[in-house]
Image (cartoon, helix red, strand yellow):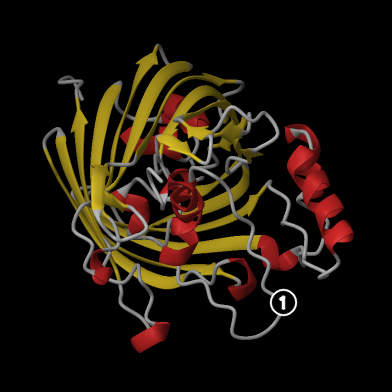
Amino acid sequence: MRRKATGYFIALCTAIFFFAAGATAQSGAVNVVTTAVPFLRISPDARSGGMGDVGIAMSPDANAAFWNRAKTPFAKKTNAIGLTYTPWLQDLGVGDVFLASLAGYHKIGDDQAISASMRYFSLGSIQFTDFAGNPLNSFRPKEFCIDFGYSLKLSPNLGLGLALRYINSSLANGSVNGVSYKAGNAVAGDITLFHDGTESGTKQGLNWGITLSNLGSKIGYTNDAQNKDYIPANMGLGVAYTKIFDESNKMTFGLDVNKLLVPAPPVATNNFSTDSAALADYRNSSVISSWFKSFGGSTDLLKSFQASLGVEYSYSDLFFLRTGYFYEDKTQGNRQYFSVGIGLKYSNIGLNFSYLVPSGNGVTRNPLSKTLRFGLLFYLDPSN
């Protein structure tokens, strides 16, 4: 036996996001929708991280590619780059799991923009052993994605964004019982809309956005074409209202609602033939049909939506205070938390910091408690 734990490790890493979210099954019908590459659902932006993960309709910055690319033609700056570092699961004493991200855009005139982003998720070091517990070797699972996008103003207030993404997930390698495991690969795309409803000059008003993200192929870790998993295709709706009090003080209130376009797995009936047929149908569904199936099945439709509510206070666009709340039904992962954040801007450099407020005690403690995000923004146009 070469690696006792390798086969199980893939399933563990696929579900790690939901474990980290504090999913519980104490009561009620719990049927969590799971996907591969769940790191794509982790907020990679310290600004939005301080607002309960609100970002779809917020004012554009360098990290717009992670939320809504259609915003970038409306950015004030011509060029910008953003970097964010997020230690992951620190409250569990894990020291080598982290998410790092890089994003940026360049405006072409007043109506177009190109952008790119990258996310790298390290799951630390895993020690493999044989049946007797003897160490064999270690492996450092990791995942990353890189994408490129184009955005265009369809009108003075409406923008369209398109993106193409490559995803790589290397969770395990080698052979177990004749099955060879390899890195998984997938290709996906985004289609986004953004409406800038703020008043010219004052920039007060209501923005809204619609996003369809990670629309793409399944991903597999073996040569078995039937043994592939869904990636986290998602539909998001967002609004953000900015209130200007005077030339120095303003507040923005944001609300995002998201839904995974992935069907819930079939509920076990303890009848082998029935369960086998249901599982085969689930796994063999085409990607496009799975998007529509996500609105039906055994999951209560309302409970399948996640909501983020956030507030940002700005003083002279130099100092920012943020807070927010994220809600997910307990049957879908039970991620529920408050977050706070601050931001500073000096000349062409911005600094953002967010903190997830601890909640729960003992076995009910949220493993995401004390999550930190550190972000840097660089505005590269010296004329602005």
In the visual, does 283 lie left or right of 143? right
In the visual, does 300 lie left or right of 195? right
Question: Farthest residue in the right direction?
Answer: 274
Question: Where is residue 170 shown, x and y percent of the image?
Answer: 40, 35
Q: Viewer-proximal residue, 172 or 102?
A: 172
Identify the residue shown where x is 25% and y is 70%: 91
Tell me: residue 308, above or below residue 287.
below
Question: Where is residue 118 shown, x and y percent of the image?
Answer: 35, 30
Question: Farthest residue in the left direction?
Answer: 346
Q: Is residue 86 visible from the viewing direction of this image?
A: no
Circle count: 1
Dot 1: few (<14), some (14–19), or many (≥20) neighbours within 10 Å?
A: some
Question: Where is residue 162 shown, x and y percent of the image?
Answer: 56, 23
Tell me: residue 376, above or below residue 98.
above
Identify the residue shown where x is 69% and y is 68%: 303
Identify the residue shown where x is 21% and y is 25%: 384
Q: Viewer-proximal residue, 91 or 320?
A: 91
Which residue type carries mark 1? Ala
Q: Which residue is label 1 attached to?
A: 29
Tell me which corner region of the image, top left, top right, bottom left or bottom right, holds residue 51: bottom left
Q: What element carries label 1?
A: loop
Question: Where is residue 146 shown, x and y percent of the image?
Answer: 40, 26
Identify the residue shown where x is 45% and y is 35%: 175
